[in-house]
Amino acid sequence: MDVNELVEIRPQERQIAWQKLEFTAFLHYGMNTFTNSEWGSGKESPSLYNPSCLDTDQWCEALKAAGIRACILTAKHHDGFCLWNTNFTDHSIMYSPKPVDVVEQLAASSEKYGLKLGLYLSPWDRHESCYGSGKPYDDFFCGQLEELLTRYGKLYSLWFDGACGEGPNGKKQVYDWERYYNLIRRHQNDAVIAISGPDVRWIGNEAGATRPSEWSVVPARMRDTGKIAENSQKTDDGSFRERLIRWEDEDLGSREALKNEKELVWYPAEVDVSIRPGWFYHPNENDKVKSLESLLNIYERSIGGNAVLLLNVPPDTEGRIHIEDCRRLKELGEKIEGIFGENLLKDVLHISSDVEDISHPAENILKNDESFWQPIKEKAKLEIILAKKVKISCLVIQEQIRESQRIESFSIYAKTDEWQKIYTGTTVGYKKICRFNPVETSGLRILIEESRISPTLRFAGAY
Ligand code: FUL
């Protein structure tokens, strides 16, 4: 693959809008919440679903406190129990003691709180009798999907799990993915289709592990739904949630990795990880909510590692987010605000670069808009001189991904008595959070050492 072809691979508008959300939440809630399990059999009675004080406003409030901008609800998990008033099955909330449409409630709450809404609809359905029969199940699934796509306003993501097993009759369904995708594009063209879908790539583990070099330009074969299913969870096994990135999946997008590929795509990564050990709420995990330190670390490595963070926060049997999770989310939000609330690159005396291009000058990186710096050279240096010294331990940089992903390696220097190297990195992409030992500096240099033709930077911030 020639380098000119690499930079021709660019994101769709829906992928850019999704990436800009940065911090999003998963809400695993449903029958499993009430049976204290992770995977239901599909044989559970709807009478078991009975939240005592369902409050989706409270969910949104808890998420907002952390700075989360969107949420994805499990409208139907593998057990087939539906959280909305569907016409296609009576295995739903409508036949439970609490016949309240949760999708409708959450759609209203998320609108009220300014959160985007996405839905998880498990293709694998352990309850539905036509599962595994081919077209009849595809009709059933598309019917459900269409209800979700047309009744609850604008959706930002449709999330299809790779997990797939046999149905109640022992048969396995061969999904008509193209038909599902067409239906989504028809009704919700701005929504991304995630995981078993063409727009958003699963990072490949559920433990919050990330790659040091995360590329959004990857081989088209990564979208193969068969492969995605193969790598997904196959049994209800807690150890799967702890598995990290396998070494053979470490490098998906370097020039070396792509050199023999025939077709490439823009397929950016999403990190899905739970705030607790399980995806669903379990009372015995109330003291196992991840620490602030661990969450902040995941936040910085994922969002600051060219990925979107999808942090799972499971509502409990009352139908509320548990107080422990609420506390942690609030602490996390305060911490993030404390770190990233004020960009210390405000009093800039002088900004310059060694290769100037008048249409994309260096000062564009100080504006928080779509404009960008772009030297017409693979290697380039950008220098920022500050009016007074600042103490910093972090630099955030962003490429203009509309121009593809180009930076392959870079270094950062701080001006103490002399210029001192404080960081070396590889990919940047949508956002890179570069952490280093605290340093007092009156200037910064960003050296782009390797890039694809001509790199871009649209933002730099020091904290
Ligand atoms: C997995 C599922 O099997 C889990 O239950 C959970 O929904 C997770 C996000 O995806 O594949």
Image (cartoon, rainbow, N blue to C red):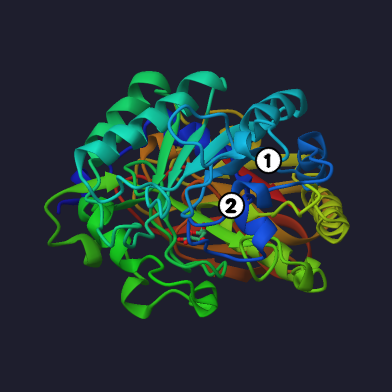
Rendered view: 441 above or below 145: below
Quadrant occupied by the C terminus: bottom right
**Label 1 near ligand 1 (CB < 8 Å):** no
Q: Which residue is drawn at 42% across and 53% down?
A: 161
Q: Which residue is drawn at 76% across and 23% down?
A: 112
Residue 162: x %, y % from top left: 37, 57
Name the amino acid type tagged 2.
Ser
Q: Say the numbered circle drawn on residue 360.
A: none
Where is mark 1, residue-wise?
A: 350
Determine whether, in the image, residue 435 is placed left or right of residue 440.
left
Q: Which residue is drawn at 53% across and 46% down?
A: 81
Is residue 81 shown to the viewer in this render?
Answer: yes
Where is mark 2, residue-wise?
A: 45
Callout in the foreground (1, 2): 2
| Label 1, label 2: how far apart the Cα atoms are | 68 Å
Residue 75: x %, y % from top left: 55, 41
Residue 438 sits in which quadrant?
Answer: bottom right
Residue 446: x %, y % from top left: 56, 55
Nearest to the observer: residue 311 or residue 363: 311
Rendered view: 187 above or below 366: above
Dot 2 surroundings within 10 Å: few (below 14), some, or many (20 or more)?
few
* Upstream in sequence: badge 1 or badge 2: 2
